[in-house]
Amino acid sequence: MPENATAICVRENSRWQFNADPEECIANTRRAFDIAPDSPVVRYYLALILVSNGQIEEAQKLLLEAMELSPDNPKYFFELAENMRFTEENEIVTGMVKAYEHNEWEKEQKVAAGFALAKIFDELGQAERAFKYCLEANALADRKFNVPRTEERRAGKESRSRWWAYH
């Protein structure tokens, strides 16, 4: 097995995606902590596998730690938003809004952060803000977006469940 923490994480994530034993993948990814105890990348990859194995609380903790170690990386924020229900606009959300508005991220990073913010503001019942981030993320991703259909959803004519994610 490789002795590089990132290599271990990528390998185990790949094995997990191809249906390897999740417990074995988790154990091997935890080895990466011994090699790189301060790595946000290790926390991120371990969190991905833990979430799929139903260990949501530990995954959330790891993603929060990854965000502390690398606050300008929206990838960690996106995964946290996907796996956590937000009930208030806390400092994590406020910080990501500021970073979204002021940071010079690559296009893919801004798309991920935009969808994460859309999901969070939808959960918080702030439809206008959610819609803003949803539209921006879709535009950045060069996706066509059916505004009239979305308006119907916003008016409650269709299920609001995950309306922010473009299908």
Image (cartoon, grey):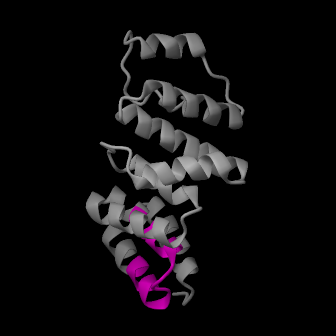
Was residue 98 drawn as part of the magenta stretch in this picture?
no
Residue drawn 35% across and 58% down? 51
Q: Quadrant of the C terminus?
A: top right
What's the magenta bit mostly, secondary-structure-wise? Answer: helix
**Residue 160 higher or lower than 3, as above or below:** above
Whether residue 110 sits left or right of residue 54 in the image: it is right
**Residue 33 higher or lower than 65, as above or below:** below
Residue 15 lies, in percent from the top left, at 48, 68
Residue drawn 38% across and 9% down? 157
Residue 117 lies, in percent from the top left, at 49, 41
Residue 46 lies, in percent from the top left, at 41, 69
Frontmost residue, 163 versus 31: 163
Whether residue 57 sits left or right of residue 155 in the image: it is left
Corner quadrant of residue 73: bottom right
Residue drawn 29% across and 58% down? 56
Was residue 32 drawn as part of the magenta stretch in this picture?
yes
Residue drawn 36% across and 35% down? 123
Residue 53 lies, in percent from the top left, at 30, 60
Frontmost residue, 2 versus 148: 148
- Span shown in magenta: 28-47
Frontmost residue, 113 versus 51: 113
**Residue 56 higher or lower than 5, as above or below:** above
